[in-house]
Image: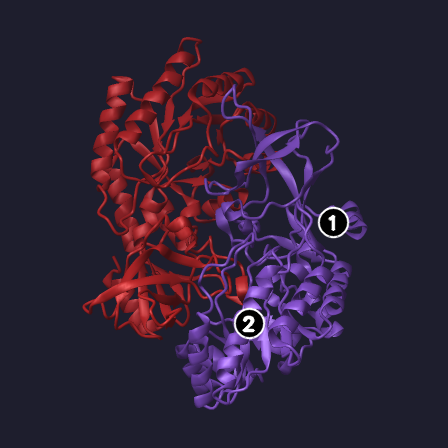
Chain colours: A red, B purple
Amino acid sequence: MATQRVLDFLASRRPAGPCLIVDLDVVAENFRAFEKALPQSKIYYAVKANPAPEILRLLARMGSSFDTASVAEIEMALDAGATAERISFGNTIKKERDIARAYELGIRLFAVDCVEEVEKIARAAPGAQVFCRVLTDGEGAEWPLSRKFGCVPTMAVDVLRHAASLGLDAYGVSFHVGSQQTDLSAWDRALGDAKKVFSTLAGEGIVLRMVNMGGGFPTRYLRDVPAAEVYGQAIFEALSKHFGNVIPETIIEPGRGMVGNAGVIKSEVVLISRKADNDNVRWVYLDIGKFGGLAETMDEAIRYPILTERDGDEKGACVLAGPTCDSADVMYEKSPYPLPLSLTIGDEVLIEGTGAYTTTYSAVAFNGFEPLRSYVI
Amino acid sequence: MATQRVLDFLASRRPAGPCLIVDLDVVAENFRAFEKALPQSKIYYAVKANPAPEILRLLARMGSSFDTASVAEIEMALDAGATAERISFGNTIKKERDIARAYELGIRLFAVDCVEEVEKIARAAPGAQVFCRVLTDGEGAEWPLSRKFGCVPTMAVDVLRHAASLGLDAYGVSFHVGSQQTDLSAWDRALGDAKKVFSTLAGEGIVLRMVNMGGGFPTRYLRDVPAAEVYGQAIFEALSKHFGNVIPETIIEPGRGMVGNAGVIKSEVVLISRKADNDNVRWVYLDIGKFGGLAETMDEAIRYPILTERDGDEKGACVLAGPTCDSADVMYEKSPYPLPLSLTIGDEVLIEGTGAYTTTYSAVAFNGFEPLRSYVI
């Protein structure tokens, strides 16, 4: 996944220290693939995945809308050229003063998952459109979602009814099947739940019009994943099955699926050692770790492909760790990572599939190390 | 633990958004307590715990030495007024060019845990003092150390012998009993291991002179912990037991123990909701979470005391979560946290014992949220 453009950049620029390089051509290709796979859906790029201005400008130019998590992200999307009607304030947890600020900036689309949030929006963003997030089970996702966001479908009915009663536009429901979701039936189950909310409220004269299908579209890490088209087909079939002829407007919110495979982190081997003479596992320490951008290796959830210049050589199991004095800064230990036996201190490695959830996750100055630098080319 | 000075600061300054307030008087008191408890030991403050310049300047003035994890931290300690001979480069994972830079800056004391690192130091910092970190089991620590740092004692003998053979000063051994260690016998076991390394090398004519006993001194979270004096007494007894009349120089590296209880985070309740009508656990969302400075709630390892203005009221179980659109941003879920039933959106809460490992752990811009601000008073 390290494209020739990325390799050329690294060869000519030789940036010092760990850094992320994002290839905009890949982002553009991903955007077109989503458009092609789900031609009826509006694409809201999840800004939190990677808010680099170059990425936001490219996507704004290509016609993307934007899913934002904070006022700062709304401002970034506006700065990149998106108009307010293409921006959703998709965080279900918002301070009332932030809702008011978003409303001032022209935002009219908000996520909710409880009546308490509906009441804030009714006060701070009168008349706005709201969609209610419904809990899904997240089964099959590599980075599973907890119950943090959403409510059960029966409660979603109450939430949207309450919104309508307060003069808000009860617009639809959202769900998120979990990041890196590879089980296509997850969308089918979630769309079935969504339809029930639609039907119940329709019986009371409240007509929902939109289903926000969230993200969860995987990027390729170590295993092959179904391509966007396969997802599109499965989702289209599930929509038809549950909604028949009256298919609602749909929104998707790819983040990782848009930028994950567009990024490669360049890192350096700082140390290779053993803990005892009879250790059969080497410890390989890189100059990037869990606090420097690889936070998603938490619980070894995401296993990135790692390239070295010695990949033809025989491999052996390694524990892979970061450079900080923090014992939690270990990426892969329970499932050791096979790396070439010839790997040497000072070698460069490329960590692929790191375009999403890396730069902004990195610690501001932990152990004095600076946050992950990034180059968008 | 929120001192009157902190409460007065909050009342008069009313800082907006989540922030940490550190009371320097508490830091000074902690420093004096360590001095009193272990009068024979040199105190090397672990800069990574909280590198705020005001803290470093205070400790430099009080006579502290400094344990650093990177060149940036070395520079911070120098800027704060510490001279180079009071600074240890305590990270066992160092780039050779960083060792060279530290040497240029006058640093002559380095941590190692393998022959590979010894060779870097011999090349980049000829003649420097090195101490070898020995693995301990970390049993009894709340924030357990993995095997990331250190080697088994028999290998430490090889490492220090190799250092001596390359012209380095084989100075001693170090260990770290694990953060928040409350089992006093952990120091006894580790000192027993250290003594074995001393004895073996003495038999070869290599005379070690120093034991670096690391950190691990707990700060008070929810449960009472033995005071510094009790630690001092236990450590003194263990030193006498293993080293008899020839007690080596000792170093301690408190981080959390120096600043943990000096800091309080002020946060705001953004949302309180339930996921279903019959939920018996409320979800309480704060404007700070795992990515905003509370990283050490990972796996619910550290349970901070939380104060509200309604603590006299009846309490009920809550899941406590942060404000980001990340489902991993949940602090306490497996063990719900009791908070007043009367707690209301917009309420302020104080999270105590947060002076260490919070500001620098916070994500640089995740979800568009800015890193944790801090006020040192």
Chain of the residue under the numbered disc 1 shown in the image: B
Q: Which marked residue is nearer to the observer: mark 2 or mark 1?
A: 1
**Disc 1 residue type?**
Met
Q: Residue at x 78, y 45 (%)?
A: B11
Q: Is residue A200 left or right of residue A100?
A: left
Which SS class for mark 1? Answer: loop
* Residue B306 shows in the view: yes
Q: Is residue A45 left or right of residue B15?
A: left
Q: Quadrant of the C terminus of chain B?
A: bottom right
Q: Residue at x 33, y 69 (%)?
A: A278
Q: Residue at x 49, y 64 (%)?
A: A324
**Disc 2 residue type?**
Ala
How far from the left and from the top, in percent, is residue B38? 71, 69
Label 2 to label 1, Cα distance in Å? Answer: 31 Å
Nearer-the-camera pick, B375 or B116:
B116
How far from the left and from the top, in percent, is residue B351? 66, 45
Residue A104 against residue A359 in the figure, above or below: above
Which SS class for mark 2? Answer: helix
Residue hosting label 1:
B1
Residue hosting label 2:
B72
Residues indicated by labels 2 and 1 sit on the same polypeptide chain:
yes
Write down the quadrant of residue B253 in the picture: bottom right
Chain of the residue under the numbered disc 2 shown in the image: B
How far from the left and from the top, in percent, is residue A224? 22, 47
Q: Residue at x 66, y 44 (%)?
A: B305
Residue A213 against residue B130 in the figure, above or below: above
